[in-house]
Image (cartoon, rainbow, N blue to C red):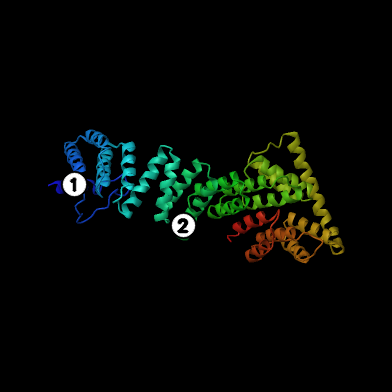
Amino acid sequence: MRFAAAALALALMTGTALGTAPALAQKQEKPKPPKLSKPVMAVVQEVQKLQQAGDHAGAIAKLDAAREVPRAEADDALILAKLKLFSAQTLKDNAKLEEGLTEAVEAPSISPEEKTNFSKFIAGLSLNRKDYQKSIKWYDYYLSQVPGDIEMTVQAASAYAAMNARPKVIELLGKAISLREAAGQKGEKTWYAFRAQAAMDANQNDQLQSALISWVKAYPEPDTFNKAIEITKQRGGNMDNNLLIDWGRLMWAAGAMATSNNYLEYADAAIDRGMPNEADMVLKEAVAKQLVDPAKPNIKEFMAIAVSKNAESKAGIASLEKEAGSSPRIALVVADTLANLGQHQKAVGYYKGLVGNSVIDQDTVNLRMGAALMKLGDKAGAKAAFDAVKPGPRSAIAQFYTVLLGG
């Protein structure tokens, strides 16, 4: 009868569950009678009587009192742990539940399948009570057995984040995102943002840029582009207006202008670099969106300058084109002015004439030619131009543009 009683104890726990989570114990068609020592068998019988009477608090107290009873046989520790699990689940006592799970995974007779299953719950319960070291230990174990579990991979990342282990956070979130994308889906938006934040906090600039590009590629939305572009610019340090005009054009193309500073920075760079038509354009939109007040003296003056210089630019382009053949630098000014005026086809012609010219910065030429080709609808040509931009100040801009192209 003793073995029958023990077998009943096992049956009581078959199919028990943690909320909506998978069953703690896997159902077996014909469970083998456990091998128990006499002292443990006596405890099992007493605990079982209490459980059948509905006294689960008493059952747990009895099990706690039996801590010093030697676990001499192979199944002693596991049976006692499972009895504790059954009562702890009934009482919804997470502390005792975690205790029972931990005792179970350390039991010598636990199967690899059950150990893996139980480790999942230990990791979550210990994370909930902020025991991050224990949580990480069991997340690591579980993921070593089930590396494709996306949800647990993300949970593990949150545990490592609590320990400020940012490289591990980047690794785990990257893995979760890769698993989702391999299945033809995208990760949750917060995963991309949190991975980028971890890379930024860890000063891992190589990881940061790829994380930002992955983020906007998965969620090509104005707000996402705005955040990703702003982060990249902040990491780039001080920039002159020649570079800021390219960032402004990118943000405009992405529809990601969101603040008065976005508009004013672009407009200021455009005025300074002789592209007043763009300054006029962005200032008017800023006013329409009520992000700047045209009645304020400084804004009013700024807008008047843009209009005046825009007229000068349009009037002077013809004579400027005549000089383009005499100097590559003037040819670049002409190309930029034409692009500023929206004459992208003519601008591309001048940019193409400057490709390979050692006097002119080729990254600037390729980036701006790509932007003009994109506006003309030539995606293949634009992508080729962006791909030609080498690592440097404009490479991140080219990568963002490539995402806009859908590449």
- Label 1: how many residues lie within 10 Å, few (<14), some (14-19) or many (20+)? many
Give the x, y percent position of residue 43: 20, 39
Q: Dots 2 and 1: beta carbons under 8 Å?
A: no
Give amino acid for label 2. Leu
For residue 6, the mark is 1
Give amino acid for label 1. Ala
Label 1 sits on a secondary structure element that is helix
Which callout, 2 or 1, points at the residue further toward the start of the chain? 1
Residue at x 83%, y 59% (from the top left corner): 329
- Label 2: how many residues lie within 10 Å, few (<14), some (14-19) or many (20+)? some
Give the x, y percent position of residue 77: 27, 45
State the residue in front, 332 or 293: 332
For residue 179, the mark is 2
Give the x, y percent position of residue 399: 63, 57
- Choose top left, top right, bottom left or bottom right for residue 230: top right
State the residue in front, 178 or 289: 178
Asked if residue 161 shows in the view, the reply is yes
Label 2 sits on a secondary structure element that is helix
Q: Is residue 47 above or below residue 168?
A: above
State the residue in front, 28 or 343: 28
Q: Is residue 139 above or below residue 130?
A: below
Image quarter where the C terminus lies is bottom right
Asked if residue 151 shows in the view, the reply is no
- Would residue 312 appear left or right of 142 to someone viewing this image? right
- Give the mark toward the camera: 2 or 1: 1
Task: Quote the CA–CA distance across marks 2 and 1.
Answer: 43 Å
Q: Is residue 345 above or below residue 39?
A: below
For residue 356, the mark is none
